[in-house]
Image (tube, rainbow, N blue to C red):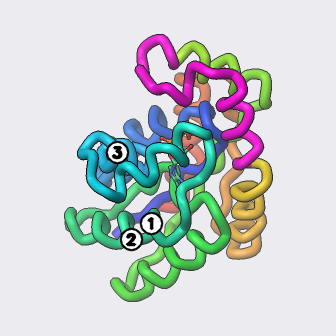
Amino acid sequence: MNNLVIFGAPGAGKGTHATILAEKYNLYHLSTGDRLRQEVASQSALGLEIKAVMERGDLVDDDTVTRIVNKAIIEDPRGIIFDGFPRTVRQAKVLDLLLEIYHQKINCVVRIDVPRDELIRRIKDRSVTSGRKDDTDEAIIKRRLDEYENKTFPVIDYYRQNGVLLNIDASGSIEQTKARIAEAVAKHM
Ligand code: ADP
């Protein structure tokens, strides 16, 4: 079974390219951001707790996120493309353990790399259609990018050491990036 991680900063295009890859390889697209937004929309006790965290642009705590992933992993028998997870080294380690339980592993981690200025531009463009509060306010966007640089960036080294990291220049158009990803990923499927 194939399992992929799509990795990148907020606004890099993880959702877009995860959707393309999920269709191409018949994978289950698991977006932790979408799951967390569903939890908030349900107005559950947990949803109310994480709403404020997400609106500030902070990362939700590892235990909450890994619990959600743990539950979602058994919903669909196909391989999974993880979108927005792992975002900390601790989450990356939990993911390895979870996959091990099911005798699975990650084929490769597709890191899509975009310069910071371009990320801010993309998030602002997206805010017109996303309806996401955290996409509209520049201070919150910067907070999310800081969280990425401080807590998520070390995950790159974790996967580089495991030998599964693919670095993709994603500063160009969706079509250009799609072609680059397709070429790199094909060798690992
Ligand atoms: P983006 O990558 O554009 O920020 P996401 O939908 O992936 O969009 O994430 C939105 C928010 O959801 C994050 O800012 C964070 O608060 C929360 N979130 C999503 N995935 C995780 C995760 N793996 N760990 C912690 N928080 C998460």
Quickly name the residue at label 2: 67
Predominant secondary structure, magenta span: helix
Location of residue 29 with respect to 92 vertically, above or below: above
Quickly name the residue at label 1.
Answer: 64
Q: Is the C-beta separation of discs 3 and 2 under 8 Å? A: no
Q: Residues within 10 Å of mark 3 (few under 14, many from 20)?
A: some
Q: Position of residue 177 (x, y in %)?
A: 60, 31
Does the beta carbon at disc 1 come under 8 Å from ligand 1? yes
For the point 60% across and 23% down, which residue is it? 123
- The answer to whether the beta carbon of the residue marked 3 is less than 8 Å from any atom of ligand 1 is no
Asked whether disc 2 touches disc 1, contact meaning CB atoms under 8 Å apart, the reply is yes
Label 1's element? Answer: helix
Figure disc tally = 3
The x and y percentages for residue 59 are 59, 53
- The amino acid beneath tag 2 is Arg
Label 2: how many Cα within 10 Å (few below 14, some 14–19, many 20+): few
